[in-house]
Amino acid sequence: MIAELETPPAVEEIAPTAGRLSKLRGRLSRSQNAFGRSLLGLLGAGTLDDDSWEEVEDTLLMADLGAAAAAEITEKLRGAVAAHGVTDAASARALLRRVLIEAVDPTMDRAVRALPHDGRPSVLLIVGVNGTGKTTTTGKLARVLVADGRHVVLGAADTFRAAAADQLQTWGERAGAAVVRADAGTDPASVAFDAVKRGIADGADAVLIDTAGRLHTKTGLMDELGKVKRVVEKQAEVDEVLLVLDATTGQNGLVQATVFADVVDISGIVLTKLDGTAKGGIVVAVQRTLGVPVKLVGLGEGPDDLAPFEPAAFVDALLGD
């Protein structure tokens, strides 16, 4: 049986979303130490020989950029240093900043499509392996959208984990978003269908659907997510499929990403636990692997620690003060 929970009147105050990444830059200190400062130290040391450039490339590899990106960035840095030289720490920083921002690719469209259209709400599927922070991310994204003035409905379609619906309900109550849920074991597609139906009836701006994150077999995952998407699209098109990845898993996360990308058309990536890794280069690696942008990043345990991703602010945080 599907239960529709009315939004309680008392909701929490939500922090503004603008400039969150800049405010949270201190959370990237692990990446700053292992990545930004190491590179700045190497580039600012004066004349670089072949061994030094190998060390630059190794540092990039250890930050999880991936072999191709690490080699490409090293060559760009090497060419720029050969052409213009690096005279001091400030010029080293300016060069590294420019090349890294280019690698992160500021031309990608990172807007989260969460506005109503054609008289219907925008529909966002949140996918990913259980344990990556998928349900938490769905709740935090609801807060981001509510803070920006949007009316949100949440669909608890991860019906295989009883705790997932309870967790999402709590997030919904705190943010002021209606939640549609069902008993454990209910067909996820039926919950997703009812969530979209509720969103349309309420005149909501966006419906966020938390999907099950089991990865037993690609076939099972494909059948399940495919069915959810098909059933939802009987009422409204799916505007976003956001893949939640745990940044601390590094290259293992990329393997998960490719499995999901084979199953559904991923439109954007949410990187959680970016504050807990020294491997900030995963942003570049996952974008190159999937060809879609990182749209949001998780930088802590707080309810408002989900930030819209901004390439320049991210690189500045990596390089430190």
Image (cartoon, rainbow, N blue to C red):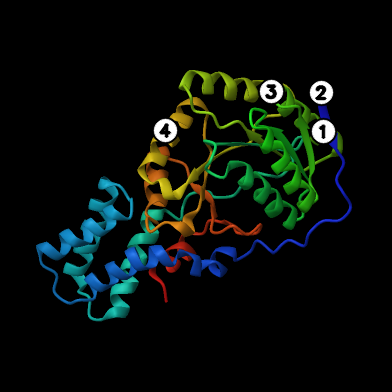
Camera-side mark, 2 or 4: 2
Which tag is nearer the camera, tag 3 or tag 4? 3
- Location of mark 3 (residue): 185
Helix, strand or loop at mark 3:
loop
Q: Which residue is mark 2?
A: 1
Tag 3 and tag 2, C-beta contact below 8 Å = no
Q: Quadrant of the N terminus?
A: top right
Q: In terms of image quadrants, where is residue 3?
A: top right
Tell me which numbered mark, 2 or 4, is placed earlier along the sequence. Answer: 2
Instruction: List the residue tagged with mark 4.
Output: 258
Label 3: few (<14), some (14–19) or many (≥20) C-alpha neighbours in 10 Å:
few
Q: Residues within 10 Å of mark 1 (few under 14, many from 20)?
A: many
Q: Say whether disc 3 or disc 4 marks the residue closer to the N-terminus.
A: 3
SS category of the residue bearing label 2: loop
Give the number of callouts: 4
- Three-letter amino acid code at disc 3? Gly
| Residue type, label 4 | Thr
Q: Earlier in the sequence, mark 3 or mark 2?
A: 2
Mark 3 → mark 4, Cα distance in angstroms: 27 Å
Q: Residue at x 23, y 71 (%)?
A: 43
Mark 3 and mark 4 residues within 8 Å of each other at the beta carbon: no
Please name the residue shown 57% across and 69% down the image.
Answer: 23
Give the alpha-carbon distance from disc 3 to disc 2, as whole Å.
11 Å
Q: CA distance from mark 1 to mark 3?
A: 21 Å
Up/down of 216 relative to 18, above or below: above
Q: Residue furthest bottom?
A: 88
Expressed as whole percent of the image width and height from the top left, the position of residue 53 reads 16, 62
Proximity of marks 2 and 1: CB atoms separated by less than 8 Å: no
Dot placed on the residue nearer the N-terminal end, 4 or 1: 1
Which amino acid, by three-letter code, is at mark 2?
A: Met
- Viewer can see residue 217: yes
